Amino acid sequence: MSPEGPQLEFLDLIDGLEQLVIESRRLPVGGNLVVDRRRLLDLIDQLRLAIPADLRQAQQVLEARQQIIDDAHLTARRTLERAEQERARLIDEHALTRAAQERAQQLLMDAEARARQIIAEADATAAAHLSEAAEATRQELENLNRYTREVLQRLERLLTQLLGSVRENLEQVEREQP
């Protein structure tokens, strides 16, 4: 998913908040607004759902990493079990016990080396995926934070203008009273 997807959804939700403020009724005294509480809470819930998409992806990478490691351990254990079974079979089937033990020992060492290699490769793969996901998440959150700051500053300016307009109207009404 491109970084624009969640960001656009997030931006749409911020625009929805702004529209809710603009459409809200003004109280005649104090310049406060009457905001539709249900709509506001719905927008806040949607904002919460829009932000953690990258965090869910990072969790999936962690789970995939754990699965890779678990699979590597299982493969290693099975390889060791097969090597041990082969060792026992060689000892039982051949009169030359010494040769069988040496072969079994070599198989066991090879299996252990392969198991270490599989685990190291799985760890490296999982670490690479985790690092990529962490960087993508960091960049996405940085972009979202920057945009949120811009939208909130814009909203603050708009509210300041609205408040100034309300004050001017209130002063005009007070000047016109007998």
Image: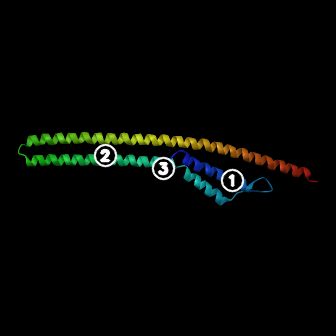
Q: Which mark is residue 19?
A: 1
Task: Give the residue pinned by disc 3.
Answer: 56
The amino acid pointed to by label 2 is: Ala
Q: Which mark is residue 163?
A: none
Q: Residue at x 90, y 49 (%)?
A: 175
- Spatial CA span between label 3 and label 2: 24 Å
- For this rendering, which residue is in front, 68 or 105? 68
Whether residue 162 sits left or right of residue 39 in the image: it is right
Whether residue 25 sits left or right of residue 87 in the image: it is right
Whether residue 54 sits left or right of residue 27 in the image: it is left
Q: Residue at x 8, y 48 (%)?
A: 93
Question: Residue 32's spot in the image, x, y percent?
Answer: 75, 54
Give the mark nearer the N terminus: 3 vs 1. Answer: 1
Task: Give the residue pinned by disc 2.
Answer: 72
- Spatial CA span between label 2 and label 1: 53 Å
- For this rendering, which residue is in front, 69 or 53? 53
The local crowd at label 1, few if under 14, some if 14 to 19, many if 20 or more residues have their Cα within 10 Å, is: few
Q: Residue at x 61, y 58 (%)?
A: 42
